[in-house]
């Protein structure tokens, strides 16, 4: 079968289309004929060799996909740590989900990583089954990215009041069309200062980070200002001071959703 292979660690130039052996279904796995794959920043990190748990090259790239079960032909979308960018993949059945009617293969391939990550953050913060009627207030960093836009759409369904940070007004305008109420261009405005002067600065529920943790201190400050739980949508850079899970500002931590 044809596959996109990471022959060595590096930039896009290390990706090669190669003929690779067909995978077998394996014990407790299902064979899927892949129709489309979704590209994420985690895939870029994997190609660079910076994503934790990545095996040594060569390896087949890709972590989310959409296709048909080899047995039965049901259309499914799925997740894998790697090996999704190939004509076939041997997948864990618990990481396969039916594709809704009317969705294209591209729609299905773009869904699992972004939307399940955002959903997990809301669930981890306890926002899916709140007993009170007060709207949760959420801060979403990198709001114009894949996980960020998914978080906005889910937050809209949950009735959340959302603040989002991005690098341009154009990006913020597009996300506001999805339901974001408050946009912060961090290149022109310090989001910490914006939160400090917010009349609701003490009523935050969740701070969701959607990129590699290169500046965790600023994110922690935002959590301490807001009194929110802190979750991240991507595993942070190797840092012994960071732990897994969601927590209160007294012990800020990150959730490894990758």
Image (tube, rainbow, N blue to C red):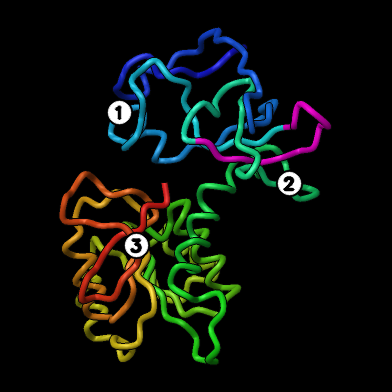
SS at badge 2: strand
Q: Earlier in the sequence, mark 2 or mark 1?
A: 1
Q: Position of residue 113 (x, y in %)?
A: 51, 47
Q: Is residue 184 above or below residue 62?
A: below
* Residue 104 visible to an observer of this rendering: yes
Q: Position of residue 194 (x, y in %)?
A: 25, 78
Locate the N terminus and report the quarter of the image it occupies. Answer: top right
SS at badge 1: helix
Mark-to-mark CA distance, 2 and 1 = 32 Å
Q: Position of residue 59 (x, y in %)?
A: 43, 19
Pick the front one: 107 or 238: 238
User: Which residue, given by chain and number where applicable, does mark 2 sit on?
Assistant: 98
Q: Earlier in the sequence, mark 3 or mark 2?
A: 2
**Mark 3 packing: few (<14 Cα in 10 Å), some, or many (20+)?**
some
Query: Residue 245 bears which disc, if any?
Result: 3
* Residue 209 visible to an observer of this rendering: no
Q: Is residue 170 above or below residue 36?
A: below
Pick the front one: 151 or 241: 241
Mark-to-mark CA distance, 3 and 2 = 29 Å
Left/right placement of residue 185 relative to residue 82 reads left
The residue under the point 68% across, 46% down is 97
Q: Is residue 69 magenta?
A: yes
| Range covered by the magenta-colored residues | 68-80
Q: Is residue 80 above or below residue 218?
A: above
User: Which residue, given by chain and number where applicable, does mark 1 sit on?
Assistant: 48
The residue under the point 62% across, 24% down is 26
Q: Position of residue 176 (x, y in %)?
A: 49, 68
Q: Are marks 3 and 2 in contact (CB under 8 Å)?
A: no
């Amino acid at each position: 079968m044809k596959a996109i292979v990471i022959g060595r660690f590096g930039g896009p130039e290390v990706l090669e289309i190669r003929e690779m052996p067909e995978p077998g279904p394996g014990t407790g796995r299902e064979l899927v004929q892949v129709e489309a794959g979704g590209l994420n920043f985690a895939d870029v990190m994997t190609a660079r060799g910076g994503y934790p748990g990545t095996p040594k090259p060569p390896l087949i790239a890709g972590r989310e996909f959409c296709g048909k079960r080899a047995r039965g032909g049901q259309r499914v979308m799925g997740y894998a740590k790697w090996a999704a960018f190939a004509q076939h993949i041997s997948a864990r059945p618990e990481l396969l989900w039916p594709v809704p009617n009317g969705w294209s293969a591209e729609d299905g391939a773009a869904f699992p990583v972004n939307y399940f990550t955002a959903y997990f953050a809301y669930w981890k913060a306890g926002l899916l089954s709140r007993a009170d009627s007060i709207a949760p207030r959420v801060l979403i960093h990198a709001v114009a990215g894949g996980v960020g836009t998914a978080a906005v759409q889910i937050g809209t369904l949950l009735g959340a009041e959302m603040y989002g940070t991005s690098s341009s007004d154009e990006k913020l305008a597009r996300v506001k069309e999805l339901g974001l109420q408050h946009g912060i261009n961090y290149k022109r405005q310090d989001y910490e200062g914006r939160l400090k002067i917010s009349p609701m600065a003490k009523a935050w529920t969740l701070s969701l980070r959607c990129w590699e943790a290169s500046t965790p201190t600023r994110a922690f400050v935002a959590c301490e200002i807001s009194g929110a739980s802190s979750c991240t949508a991507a595993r942070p850079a190797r840092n012994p001071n960071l732990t897994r899970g969601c927590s209160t500002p007294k012990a800020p931590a990150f959730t490894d959703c990758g």
